[in-house]
Image: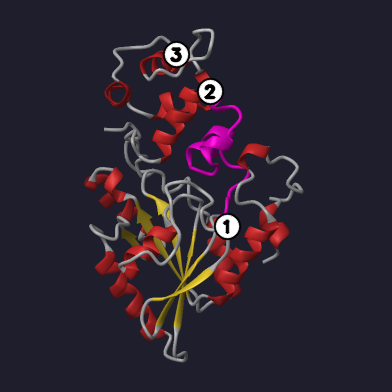
Amino acid sequence: FQAGEVEDGGNGGNDIPSNVQKGQSRRIWSELFKVIDSSDVLIEVLDARDPMGTRCKHLERKVLEIGKQKHIVLLLNKCDLIPASVTRKWVQFLSKEYPTLAFHASVTNPFGKGALFSLLRQLSRFNNKKQVTCVGFVGYPNVGKSSVINTLKGKKACRSAPIPGETKVWQYVTLTKKLYLIDCPGTVHQISSGSDTDKILRGVQRVEKITDAPDHIPGILEKADPKHLRRAYKLDSWNDPLDFLRQVAVSYGKMLRRGEPDLDTAAKMILMDWQRGRIPYFEHPPSHETNNE
């Protein structure tokens, strides 16, 4: 499992736009390999709003090739941001391949903590040749890996924030005498899959570092239900993405010196709202209708 094989996607990395390179450095990939090598159980944390978009089947296959005894678990985090009925359908769909659990990471009001704890203890029993079972957490930036660990621990054990790239290096956290958790920096997979906007909307890059923020707003307008956008930004209607941006900028007082709407600042504000789940949105499992409810 060589770094260049995944990192470059077979093209030397030359086709990766500069604004979606977060998680692509060799240092971060080396951290991922350390976590994979050290783990008996790998939990792939997915964003419940877009599980397939934040999943890496290539990585799953490679993990199984490296160690047949390694267990993979899929964790649908942020399930509080989508309807419970959609969560159930995703769990049913993904469970056909790997054990799948729904989760809401929160130290004070978690969901799925008991189920995950029970599963980890069950898997540790299969690992009776070792005194300690190591559980690695992998996934895209901003899917909530550190927050899941903090939830299991019941306190802040790892640095976490609702922005990508907060975790810089892997770190061990003791959960019990027999269970160790390993946090890993977010890594970006499926380099050739999806547009630059798709990757931005999956939280790959910190919003403040995006240089072409207005270009990604049409993607939000395509994915989000107009009624949710009207409610979030108190707008009646708009003609196109540019008109939408102008109205939001004026409504929130984002103006330039000459009285022109500051489209870049408004766009970054909208992208931040999207990354933090303030704009309702979710994908259905492939076998169901794709229109958001």
Residue 100 lies left or right of residue 34; in this view the side is left
Mark 1: secondary structure: helix
Mark 2: secondary structure: helix
Q: Which residue is mark 3?
A: 246
Was residue 44 drawn as part of the magenta stretch in this picture? no
| Location of residue 236 with respect to 155 vertically, above or below | above
Q: Residues within 10 Å of mark 2 (few under 14, many from 20)?
A: some
Residue 182: horizontal and vertical position, in percent? Answer: 48, 70
Q: Which residue is mark 1?
A: 58
Residue closer to the observer: 240 or 156 = 156
| Location of residue 215 with respect to 87 vertically, above or below | above
Span of residues in magenta: 187-215
Real-space Cα separation, disc 3 to disc 1, in angstroms: 41 Å
N-terminal of the pair, mark 2 or mark 3, is 3
N-terminal of the pair, mark 2 or mark 1, is 1
Q: Nearer the viewer, mark 3 or mark 1?
A: 3
Q: Residue at x 67, y 53 (%)?
A: 25
Q: Which residue is mark 2?
A: 264
| Location of residue 65 with respect to 86 vertically, above or below | below
Question: Which amino acid type corresponds to the residue marked 2 in the rendered image?
Answer: Asp
Q: Residues within 10 Å of mark 3 (few under 14, many from 20)?
A: some
| Location of residue 282 with respect to 58 vertically, above or below | above
Mark 3: secondary structure: helix
Question: Which amino acid type corresponds to the residue marked 1 in the rendered image?
Answer: His
Q: Residue at x 54, y 27 (%)?
A: 213
Q: Given contact means CB atoms under 8 Å apart, are the residues at marks 2 and 1 in contact?
A: no
Residue 57 lies left or right of residue 116; in this view the side is right
Residue 205: horizontal and vertical position, in percent? Answer: 55, 42
| Res. 236 image quadrant | top left
Question: Which amino acid type corresponds to the residue marked 3 in the rendered image?
Answer: Arg
Was residue 211 drawn as part of the magenta stretch in this picture? yes
